[in-house]
Amino acid sequence: MDIAIIVEGKNDKARLKRVLSPDILIHCTFGTPGSEQLDKLRKQIGGREVYIFTDNDSSGKKIRFLLREQFPDAEHIYTRRGYAGVEHTPEEYLIEQLEKAGLEAYIVYPPPSPFPDSPTRKGKE
């Protein structure tokens, strides 16, 4: 599957790169995209399957709306309200959302903790 993920900014992109295979293309809108930026994104993405992952704030919702018009068949990935955007979403939650979107094959899972009772692993067994 040839896929592309669209996020708002470079920090969001860097955050996702930590949990995704390096061959996944991640594009940034760098804020609210104008028609020129949308055309550029459309050309860069081509026929790839598109996933939109923007912040759960007013700016992110506005960007998502514009991208939805440009990429009507895109899959939408959401971060939880209360997280300060994609860039501050915990990796565990990012992975959950990527799994929900069907992207398990592209996720780079963190190595299991050598300490099964560590706080990051509690309740996961």
Image (cartoon, rainbow, N blue to C red):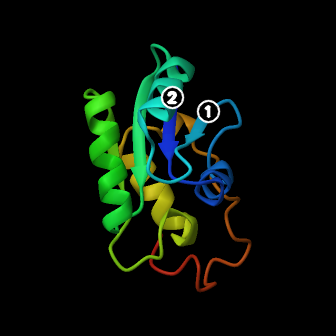
- x 36%, y 50%: residue: 63
Q: Is 44 rendered above or below residue 5? A: above
- x 51%, y 81%: residue: 122
Q: Which mark is residue 13?
A: none
Residue 1 seen: no
Q: Quadrant location of residue 35?
A: top left
Towards the viewer: 124 or 84: 84
- In x, y percent, where is residue 44? 57, 22
Q: Quadrant location of residue 70?
A: top left
Residue 122 seen: yes
Q: Amino acid at mark 2?
A: Leu
**Dot 2 lies on which element?**
helix
Q: Which mark is residue 24?
A: 1
Q: Residues within 10 Å of mark 2 (few under 14, many from 20)?
A: some
Q: Residues within 10 Å of mark 1 (few under 14, many from 20)?
A: some
**Dot 1 lies on which element?**
loop
Q: Which mark is residue 41?
A: 2
Of all residues, the one furthest to the top in this rendering is 47
